[in-house]
């Protein structure tokens, strides 16, 4: 009985405690249910969002970059298919073996081998690793033929910018290259490893237009990033094609013509519309190199080259204009009331106090008027003019012709040149203006600096009857131009008039006509002989060194005898055809010697080529039965 | 008619008095609703394994189904075996399990940085799972022979404590902190039901708290990391906290009704780790929402209520303690696993009973239910103090 009693006691304890435990379990289960309620009902929206974030991966679809074509639609920058061979580890049975097989089909370097082996081991099994880029078509076919023996080897197609004109067009187009750290704007497109943006030239200037807008693809991915399927896709906008005013063939011709010299620049411009038909600077460089990625060695070579291949000299080369500045001085004088018949006797120098200002011609030109002085580029005549006109009026005239400030071409890196004024000198050097400096300025020396583009603009404004034409590289409607002709070629509404009497311009134009087309003109030997295509021009030779009294006494050293860097710059400005001007051309040959010898023949050849290629077809008069064709 | 029925009951009562039941009578007595419950829960598990394999029966669902079949067989056999046999062999079973735990040290296959399995070709045996049942059996036998005043003597507790600590230490050494904790908790539940004084629990509790700094020194780096991660899971979303965070995202995004069968993005895109084993509840709750989760929780609750009812109905101490110990065991499995996937306790390797993919766990749980039924069938059997089926 005691046992049973004891057992009852034990059983009562058991029952009590079991119920207690059961109650505890019920409480804990309720906790689980409450937690479930919290996670799945109260916090559900937050977790749903997180789950979607996990699941969905936005992938950018880079837009194809717009092409750049010349005025006739010839592509100058296009996208090329870049075939690359990639390896997918999970599809390859043995990566090393597959690579060995591949090496029998296409060339693979030891470095490629190591890099691929390393990449393959670091990346996930389904991520393609690039083995080689830029395969030739032949290599692609060889891989395709051998595909059954190359498990895991695939061909992928990417797009690469290609510049068919290589260095001939570099200074206009610029180039594209990988995005650098400092260029990241937060736009995820820029962070794509293969993405390229414009770094120079038109490619940089119109990068936004050419780039287009990225599309997006919503992908469902798993935890390791493998794509399961595409959920939705939004196509972006491909970059817009850009039409330039440049004539690719003329540009190529100009570039090749300049390459006869070590370092030169030339600009060809339509004097009515401002269309730049050619804008060349030599030497250039191959823009295609920047696409792939330049080696340090090549880059250093480009940077250190004394001929500055990376600089577009046509818009950022600063040169003293020399005698090509004289038309500006002549116009200032005419405006000041000096007659073109005003005569000066040139003994070969001008004495001003203790200083003697020399004419380029040692014996002097004798008595010259404004026409002759322009034709023969008499320095003394222009010294005299400047003395009478004064620096202020010369400066004002120069500025009306677009000198001394950027003309606003749509290219990065344009430099303003320099037209010195009294204020400028006082501010910059801290000394008042000297009369001698006025004289030096009159022959485009001293402080005066211009770019080849500015010289072309100046020439165009001289030749088009004093209209303030503005140059342009793209055929977008310029702010100053509105109307469009029916055939789609935009013509300018009038450019603003510069308020220069036609008679004044005719004096200068006649002088420039004499330079090339009169046997005594400084550039007669470089004249255009095809009738109807004749050009007018002005030579310029600007010193880059000071000629000492001693040297002058001993006889000035000939340019050929000087080291290249100390030789004079050769300049030539011109327009053609003389009777009905259409094209202006400015040429600068760095350290080329005399303008008439080095620069004028280049300008002549370029203007002949320009007119030969003129689609509105004004062939030399000889070809249309000897009758002059009036244009207008 | 009534007469005949009466005679039948009298006969049966007489037979029970004599502790003799025919096999037919035992089968008649089997608690079939418990088996239906086990089948339902296992069915949910197999369906989730089918989903986890992206709608394929292989590799998990098919094998789990086979194990379930084998498990039902074991359940029935265990159920009809006389409880006195279980009483008699309780220690023997315990020592076999202990031997297996020692063997796993030498023959074990490593998994997740711990030695847990013995490869028996037919089955990957996980001795620690077997021990969860064996320990309760051994403790039930131990306490069966003790009167309340025996229990109040501290010296008499030495044996059950030794029985508990030996396997716990071995499991901890594998190292498997989760299972070791479960063994200790199941043992604690048995001690509690058997009538060990509450102040002794308080004493052990205080001692345990005091030893935490010392225990910390003995934890492996990954175990410490798990505890730290549990304390601040969203601190390190891609590192150690990843599992918990992804599990919570999966659960939470399931909402009330879930994303639909085989539509769980977290599970199917592999953001959810171990979805076929420890995190299977998450997958269920992602695909069937809170409705699905609560349904499974309710099924478990019914199972536990049955277990407790059987414990209360049993008239022998061995059966009572055994049933309650096993019920608590199941409770700990369910609670720790679900609390873990919901971020309430640190990540420990505890499967969800009958649902998680795993052979040993499935078989031991079926055996557990078998033992519960055996206790139920033999609820009125008297077992002597010293064991053996001699009527007192």
Image (spheres, coloured by chain):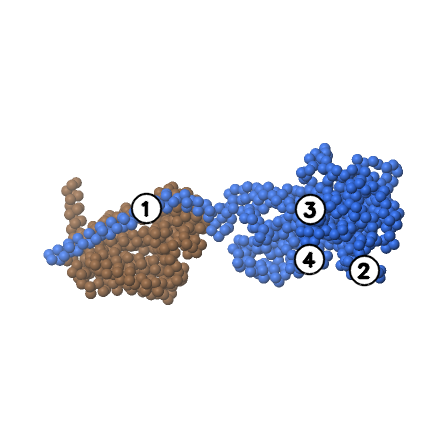
Chain colours: A blue, B brown
Position of residue A76 measured from the top left corner of the image (x, y, whole percent) = 70, 46
Position of residue A624 measured from the top left corner of the image (x, y, whole percent) = 86, 38
Label 4, label 2: how far apart the Cα atoms are:
39 Å
Chain to which the residue tagged by mark 4 belongs? A
Instruction: Identify the residue position indicated by label 4 in the image.
Output: A302
Q: Do labels 2 and 3 share a chain?
A: yes
Q: Do labels 2 and 1 share a chain?
A: yes
Instruction: Identify the residue position indicated by label 3 in the image.
Output: A406
Label 1, label 4: how far apart the Cα atoms are:
72 Å
As helix, strand or loop, the secondary structure at mark 2 comes to helix
Q: Are marks 1 and 4 on the same chain?
A: yes
Q: Are marks 4 and 3 on the same chain?
A: yes
Report which quarter residue A299 is drawn in: bottom right
Instruction: Give me the disc on residue A34.
Output: 1
Specify the farthest residue to the bottom. B106
Q: Residue at x 86, y 47 (%)?
A: A368
Q: In which quarter of the image is the N terminus of chain A?
A: bottom left
Q: In front here: A555 or B151?
A: A555
Mark sitting earlier along the chain (2/3): 3
Position of residue A111 in the picture relative to residue A307 (left or right): left
């Amino acid at each position: 009985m005691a046992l049973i009693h004891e057992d009852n006691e034990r059983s009562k304890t058991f029952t009590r405690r079991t119920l207690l435990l059961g109650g505890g379990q019920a409480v804990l289960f309720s906790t689980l249910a409450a937690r479930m309620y919290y996670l799945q009902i109260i916090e559900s929206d937050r977790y749903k969002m997180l789950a979607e974030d996990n699941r969905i991966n936005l992938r950018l679809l880079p837009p194809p970059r717009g092409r750049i074509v010349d005025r006739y639609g010839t592509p100058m920058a296009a996208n090329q298919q870049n075939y690359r061979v990639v390896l997918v580890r999970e599809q390859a049975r043995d990566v090393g073996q597959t690579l060995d097989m591949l090496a029998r089909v296409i060339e693979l370097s030891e470095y490629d081998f190591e890099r691929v082996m390393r990449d393959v081991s670091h990346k996930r099994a389904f991520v393609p690793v690039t083995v080689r880029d830029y395969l030739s078509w032949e290599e692609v076919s060889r891989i395709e033929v051998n595909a059954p023996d190359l498990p895991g080897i695939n061909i992928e197609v990417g797009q690469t910018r290609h510049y068919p004109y290589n260095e001939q067009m570099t200074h206009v187009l610029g180039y594209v290259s990988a995005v650098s750290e400092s260029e990241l704007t937060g736009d995820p497109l820029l962070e794509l490893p293969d993405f390229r943006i414009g770094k120079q030239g038109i490619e940089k200037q119109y990068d936004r237009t050419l780039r287009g807008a990225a599309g997006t693809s919503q992908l469902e991915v798993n935890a390791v990033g493998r794509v399961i399927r595409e959920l939705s896709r939004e196509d972006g906008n491909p970059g817009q094609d850009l039409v330039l005013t440049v004539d690719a063939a003329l540009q190529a011709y100009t570039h090749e013509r300049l390459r006869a010299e070590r370092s030169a620049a030339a600009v060809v411009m339509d004097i009515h519309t401002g269309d730049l038909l050619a804008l060349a600077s030599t030497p250039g460089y191959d823009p295609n190199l920047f696409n792939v990625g330049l080696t340090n060695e090549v880059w250093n070579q480009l940077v250190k080259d004394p001929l500055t291949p990376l600089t577009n000299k046509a818009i950022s080369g600063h040169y003293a204009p020399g005698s090509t500045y004289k038309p500006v001085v002549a116009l200032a004088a005419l405006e000041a009331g000096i007659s073109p018949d005003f005569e000066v006797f040139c003994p070969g120098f001008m004495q001003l106090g203790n200083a003697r200002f020399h004419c380029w011609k040692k014996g002097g030109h004798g008595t010259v008027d404004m026409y002759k002085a322009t034709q023969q580029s008499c320095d003394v005549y222009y010294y005299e003019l400047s003395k009478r006109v004064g620096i202020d009026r010369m400066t004002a005239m120069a500025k009306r012709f677009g000198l001394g400030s950027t003309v606003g071409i749509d290219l990065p890196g344009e430099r303003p040149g320099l037209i010195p004024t009294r204020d400028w000198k006082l501010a910059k050097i801290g000394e008042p203006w000297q009369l001698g400096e006025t004289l030096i300025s009159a022959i485009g020396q001293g402080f005066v600096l211009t770019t080849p583009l500015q010289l072309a603009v100046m020439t165009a404004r001289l030749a088009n009857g004093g209209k303030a034409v503005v140059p342009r590289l793209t055929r977008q409607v310029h702010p100053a131009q509105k109307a469009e002709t029916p055939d789609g070629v935009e013509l300018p509404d009038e450019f603003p008039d510069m308020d220069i009497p036609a008679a004044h311009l005719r004096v200068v134009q006649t002088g420039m006509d004499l330079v090339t087309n009169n046997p005594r003109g400084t550039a007669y030997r470089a004249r255009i002989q095809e009738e109807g295509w004749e050009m007018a021009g002005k030579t310029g030779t600007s010193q880059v060194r000071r000629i000492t009294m001693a040297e002058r006494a001993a006889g000035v050293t000939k340019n050929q005898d000087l080291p290249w860097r100390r030789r004079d710059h050769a300049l030539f400005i011109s327009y053609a055809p003389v009777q009905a001007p259409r094209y202006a051309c400015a040429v600068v040959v760095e350290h080329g010697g005399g303008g008439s010898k080095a620069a004028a023949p280049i300008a002549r050849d370029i203007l002949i080529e320009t007119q030969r290629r003129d689609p509105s077809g004004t062939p030399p008069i000889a070809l249309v039965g000897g009758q002059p064709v009036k244009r207008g | 008619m009534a007469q005949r029925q009466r005679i039948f009951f009298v006969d049966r009562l007489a037979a029970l008095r004599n502790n003799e039941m025919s096999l037919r009578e035992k089968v008649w007595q089997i608690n079939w609703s418990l088996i239906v419950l086990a089948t339902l829960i296992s069915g949910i598990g197999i369906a989730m394994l089918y989903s986890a394999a992206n709608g394929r029966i292989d590799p998990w669902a098919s094998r789990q189904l086979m194990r379930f079949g084998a498990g039902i067989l074991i359940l029935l056999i265990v159920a009809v075996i006389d409880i006195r046999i279980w009483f008699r062999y309780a220690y023997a079973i315990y020592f076999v399990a202990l031997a297996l735990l020692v063997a796993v040290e030498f023959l074990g296959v490593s998994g997740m940085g711990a030695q847990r399995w013995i490869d028996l070709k037919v089955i990957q045996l996980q001795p620690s799972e077997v021990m969860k049942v064996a320990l309760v059996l051994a403790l039930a036998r131990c306490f069966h022979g003790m009167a309340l005043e025996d229990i109040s003597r501290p010296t008499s507790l030495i044996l059950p404590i030794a029985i508990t600590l030996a396997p716990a230490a071995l499991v901890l050494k594998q190292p498997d902190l989760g299972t070791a904790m479960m063994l200790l908790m199941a043992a604690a539940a048995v001690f509690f039901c058997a009538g060990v004084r509450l102040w002794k629990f308080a004493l052990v509790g205080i001692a345990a708290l005091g030893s935490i700094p010392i225990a910390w020194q003995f934890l492996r780096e990954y175990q410490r990391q798990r505890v730290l991660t549990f304390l601040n899971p969203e601190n390190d979303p891609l590192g150690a906290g990843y599992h918990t965070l992804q599990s919570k995202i999966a659960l939470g995004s399931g909402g009330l009704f879930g994303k639909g069968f085989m539509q769980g993005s977290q599970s199917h895109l592999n953001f959810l780790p171990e979805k076929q084993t420890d995190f299977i509840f998450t997958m269920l709750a992602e695909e069937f929402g809170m409705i699905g989760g609560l349904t499974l929780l309710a099924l478990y609750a019914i199972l536990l209520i049955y277990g407790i009812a059987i414990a209360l109905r049993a008239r022998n101490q061995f059966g009572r303690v055994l049933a309650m110990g096993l019920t608590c065991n199941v409770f700990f499995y369910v609670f720790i696993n679900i609390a873990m996937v919901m971020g309430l306790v640190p990540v420990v390797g505890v499967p969800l009973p009958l649902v998680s993919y795993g052979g040993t766990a499935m078989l031991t749980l079926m055996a557990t239910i078998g033992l519960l039924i055996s206790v139920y069938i033999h609820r009125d059997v008297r077992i002597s103090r010293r064991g053996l089926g001699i009527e007192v």
